[in-house]
Image: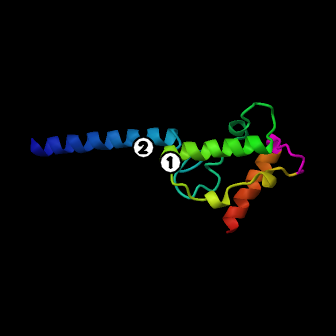
Amino acid sequence: MKRLLSICIFILLMIISSVAVAQGMQQGFGMGKGPGMGRGMGRNMPTFAEFDLDKSGYLDEEEFIEARGRRVSERAKQGRMMRGLSSMMQFPEIDLNADGKVTPEEFAQGQMAHRLKKMQQ
């Protein structure tokens, strides 16, 4: 009887842990796309919409700096490790045509270039 009870408890714990892991993966806590643990390498990069605070369809330098600061502050409050602050993306890196405005396309291209640069370090 004791052995049967132990087996049932073991099976129940396995089911519960499997469900917890599956829920964590759906919320982006596993491997693959989306927010995750580990070195990141782009999985934790912000979207243009998150940075376009005034919803104008472009970013100026002031808006970029404010959005980046909010993001860093929010992630620090969540208890995330703050690695890579010294190599954060800078406005000139994403303002590819140097017109003082960053479009969604420039933002995406700038992020890709920034990721590649980090991978080479």
> Alpha-carbon distance for marks 1 and 2?
8 Å
Q: Quadrant of residue 18?
A: top left
Residue 58 x, y percent position in the rendering: 81, 37
User: On the rendered structure, is 80 left or right of 14?
Assistant: right
Where does the magenta region start and end? 97-105
Front residue of 42 and 79: 79
Q: Name the residue under label 1.
A: 30
* Mark 1, secondary structure of its residue: loop
Q: Name the residue under label 2.
A: 21
Q: Are marks 1 and 2 in contact (CB under 8 Å)?
A: yes
Front residue of 12 and 107: 107
| Residue at x 51%, y 38% (from the top left corner) | 26
Q: Which amino acid does label 2 sit on?
A: Val
Residue 112 x, y percent position in the rendering: 74, 54
Q: Quadrant of the N terminus?
A: top left
- Height in image: 47 above or below 93? above
Magenta stretch prevailing secondary structure: loop
Q: Is residue 99 magenta?
A: yes
Front residue of 22 and 94: 94
Q: Which amino acid does label 1 sit on?
A: Gly
Q: Residues within 10 Å of mark 2 (few under 14, many from 20)?
A: some
Visual colour scheme: rainbow
* Mark 2, secondary structure of its residue: helix
| Residue at x 33%, y 40% (from the top left corner) | 15
| Residue at x 61%, y 59% (from the top left corner) | 84
Residue 42 x, y percent position in the rendering: 65, 52
| Residue at x 71%, y 36% (from the top left corner) | 49
Between discs 1 and 2, the one toward the N terminus: 2
User: On the rendered structure, is 15 left or right of 120?
Assistant: left
- Height in image: 48 above or below 36? above
